[in-house]
Amino acid sequence: MTADGIVPDMPPIRAPWIIDTLMDIGASEPGAMGPVPLSWGTIAQWQSCMGVELAPWVCRLLRRLSVEFVAESQNAREPDCPAPWIAIADDQNRATVSRKVTQAFRSLIRPKEDAS
């Protein structure tokens, strides 16, 4: 997206060290049918190798983040999947979402019409 000049609005990160730890371990691990969430053994092995002892709540959070990462990675394959940090369209903001989608399609079509 940034290669196209689009910079998405990202949610604030209040504890960047947790995300850094997750990325150091790996957000997922390979499974037989594709990426799977981190196993407890992988988290324990990382702690052993790094000489770090994480609090139990941090281990649970890392595992939960990994589960959510893998689930969202699968959901993101659908073309109409909304960004995970925005509210799902309901009747109140459906008109706004519809207008944005219409404008996006118009901007894609306009350059082709101008070239003709």
Image: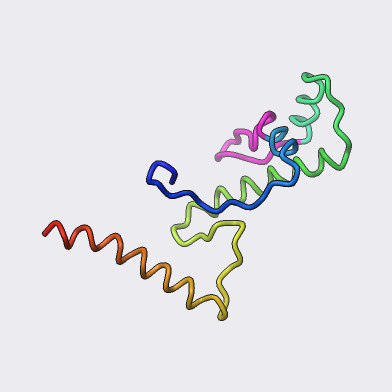
User: From what the image shows, is residue 80 above or below residue 3?
Assistant: below
What residue is drawn where x is 59% and y is 39%? 35
Q: Residue furthest left?
A: 116
Of 13 and 30, the residue lying toward us: 13
Image quadrant where residue 25 sits: top right
What residue is drawn where x is 78% and y is 44%? 61
Placement of the C terminus among the 4 image quadrants: bottom left
Name the colouring of the figure.
rainbow
Question: Where's residue 105, x and y in %?
Answer: 33, 65
Question: Where's residue 112, x and y in %?
Answer: 19, 58
Question: Where's residue 31, x and y in %?
Answer: 60, 36
Q: Give the magenta range.
A: 23-39
Question: Where's residue 37, x and y in %?
Answer: 67, 41
In the image: residue 92, left or right of residue 109: right
In the image: residue 113, left or right of residue 43: left
Of 71 and 12, the residue lying toward us: 12
User: From what the image shows, is residue 68 above or below residue 49?
Assistant: below
In the image: residue 67, left or right of residue 95: right
User: From what the image shows, is residue 5 above or below residue 75?
Assistant: above
Q: Residue furthest bottom?
A: 91
Q: Is residue 24 magenta?
A: yes
How many numbered discs, if any? 0
In the image: residue 64, left or right of residue 106: right
What residue is drawn where x is 25% and y is 63%? 109
What residue is drawn where x is 36% and y is 63%? 104
Q: Is residue 43 magenta?
A: no
